[in-house]
Image (cartoon, grey):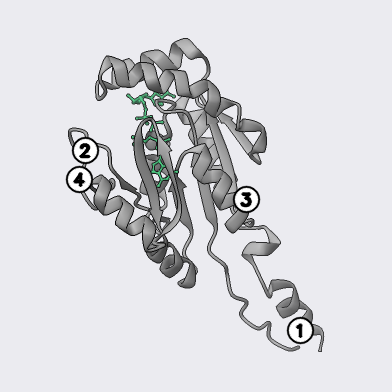
Amino acid sequence: MTDMRKPERKGQVLVLCAPSGTGKSTLVRKLRSEFPQIGFSISCTTREPRTGEEDGRDYYFLTVDQFNEKLENGDFAEWAEVHGNFYGTPKEPVEQMLFKGMDILFDIDFQGCMQLMESMPDGVFVFLMPPSYGELKSRLEGRNTDSESVISRRLRNAMKEMASAPKFEYWIVNDDLERAYGELKSIYLAGKNRPCSNPGLLESILSTWE
Ligand code: ADP
Ligand code: 5GP
């Protein structure tokens, strides 16, 4: 019997989108702590760091001029203005992680997701929803990281963001955190079994017939 040739595995692009305050960062932290091998795309932003946030770990915090320079150099895989600040995904680390076959997690807004849906059509795009407006408001207030005007702006934008949900392949309602996490984990693991994540697998098994 011929031995099966070892097929390559292709890194999975997992993109999470949600209105601010839904619990995206909480779920991202849980997934990264259970699967530390997943690469995380650290974004650039012009917003001020929140207490506890670290430059180079949570975001690269840039001035508007620094952001514009990168934009003009074509350094971003996608970018958008979100809640009055600029955010962008640096292209190079993403390309390097994909080249190494690593899975990558993106935490970006719906405008950025639309751009990645075009440039990374094999990505898995997940939209996370709050259970209700009231719950979203109390999570934003309870987080205690943003001023009242920032919270109002984020709540106003949430409706527009929810309108983009039909464009996504998967929906998760983050009511019970553990259940929502279980669903996210299932989507991530199922993504590994898609044909596009396993190029050459079929051929390698068929080659054992030769
Ligand atoms: P996002 O990254 O989407 O802006 P966060 O992860 O910062 O949101 O979550 C916003 C707040 O809601 C945090 O205080 C977090 O602890 C809380 N939270 C997240 N998920 C849940 C949940 N399922 N039930 C109740 N509170 C939650
Ligand atoms: P926050 O300021 O709460 O960290 O993030 C605000 C919003 O910006 C969130 O929806 C977050 O997913 C989004 N965001 C973070 N990084 C990026 C990025 O690189 N590109 C885009 N388009 N959105 C981002």
Of helix, strand and loop, which one carries label 4?
loop
Question: Which of the two labelled residues, at mark 1 and mark 4, occupies the earlier sequence position?
Answer: 4
Estimate the spatial distance between the alpha carbons at disc 1 and disc 2, rounded to whole Å.
Answer: 55 Å
Which amino acid type corresponds to the residue marked 4 in the rendered image?
A: Glu
Q: Position of residue 139 (x, y in %)?
A: 37, 18
What residue lies at 18% left-to-right and 37% top-to-bottom? 52
Question: Which of the two labelled residues, at mark 2 and mark 3, occupies the earlier sequence position?
Answer: 2
Q: Closer to us: mark 1 or mark 4?
A: 4
What residue lies at 52% left-to-right and 40% top-to-bottom? 111
Quarter of the image that includes the N terminus: bottom right
Of helix, strand and loop, which one carries label 1?
helix
Circles 4 and 2 in contact, beta carbons < 8 Å:
yes
Question: Which of the two labelled residues, at mark 3 and mark 4, occupies the earlier sequence position?
Answer: 4
Apparent side of residue 208 relative to residue 103 in the rendered image (left or right): right
Of helix, strand and loop, which one carries label 3?
helix
Circles 3 and 4 in contact, beta carbons < 8 Å:
no
Looking at the rendering, which quadrant does residue 160 occupy?
top right
Q: Is residue 61 visible?
A: no
Q: Position of residue 205 (x, y in %)?
A: 74, 77
Question: Which of the two labelled residues, at mark 4 and mark 2, occupies the earlier sequence position?
Answer: 2
Circle 2 sits on which residue? 49
What is the number of the mark on residue 208?
Answer: 1
Circle 3 sits on which residue? 190
